[in-house]
Image (cartoon, rainbow, N blue to C red):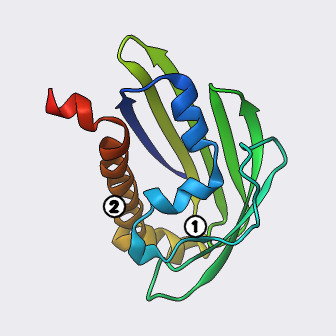
């Protein structure tokens, strides 16, 4: 069964600043909870993503067991959107679309993740029992970090 996680967040910055931050794979560990043991292992230059870019990670989502994860950037529309797709990893399907919409307050960011777990009925049960909540916790953490990075001054007004 394919599941979807969708999140929106208003960022009080310009589109170029949001794009520079989110299109650098090296920033992923900054917005991922420490207990995930998330490490980008690809030796990536400080350039932004491009279509066809392969990114390798180590992630420890359960019981601190390290897993290899590889994503490929399959779509890029500069300063508007990009999509990463799991090539190898813990999911049967993982497709994460990042969209950026300029507005009067800055940038509305929308994340849409379509994912499917392996192992059929067992995967669906694991999703109900803990995977869905774990993913929501990861994106909640991400939201809070982004609030601090992009919206701190706006929150103090």
Q: Quadrant of residue 1?
A: bottom right
**Image position, residue 131 (x, y; %):** 42, 68
Residues packed near mark 2 inside 10 Å, few (<14), some (14 to 19) or many (20 plus):
some
Whichever of labels 1 and 2 marks the residue nearer the N terminus, that label is 1
Q: Secondary structure at mark 2?
A: helix
43 relative to 94, above or below:
below
**Image position, residue 125 (x, y; %):** 43, 73
Q: Residue at x 63, y 42 (%)?
A: 23
Mark whose residue sits in front, 1 or 2: 2
Q: Nearer the viewer, residue 148 or 85?
A: 148
Residues packed near mark 1 inside 10 Å, few (<14), some (14 to 19) or many (20 plus):
many
- Asked whether residue 68 is in view, the answer is yes
100 relative to 138, above or below:
above
Residue annotated with mark 2? 137
**Image position, residue 64 (x, y; %):** 47, 87
Q: Nearer the viewer, residue 67 or 126?
A: 67
Residue annotated with mark 1? 117
142 relative to 149, above or below:
below
Q: How many marks?
A: 2
Q: Secondary structure at mark 1?
A: loop
């Amino acid at each position: 069964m394919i599941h979807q996680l969708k999140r929106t967040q208003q960022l009080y910055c310009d589109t170029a600043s949001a794009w520079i931050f989110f299109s650098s794979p090296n920033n992923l560990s900054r917005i991922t909870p420490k207990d995930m043991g998330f490490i980008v292992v690809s030796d990536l230059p400080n350039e932004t993503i491009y279509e066809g870019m392969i990114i390798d990670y180590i992630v420890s989502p359960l019981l601190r067991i390290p897993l290899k994860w590889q994503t490929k950037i399959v779509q890029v529309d500069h300063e508007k959107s990009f999509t990463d797709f799991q090539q190898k990893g813990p999911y049967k399907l993982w497709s994460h679309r990042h969209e950026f919409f300029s507005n009067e307050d800055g940038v509305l960011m929308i994340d849409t993740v379509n994912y499917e777990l392996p192992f059929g009925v067992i995967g669906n049960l694991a999703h109900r029992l803990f995977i869905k909540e774990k993913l929501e916790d990861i994106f909640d953490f991400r939201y809070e970090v982004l609030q601090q990075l992009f919206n701190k001054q706006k929150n103090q007004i």
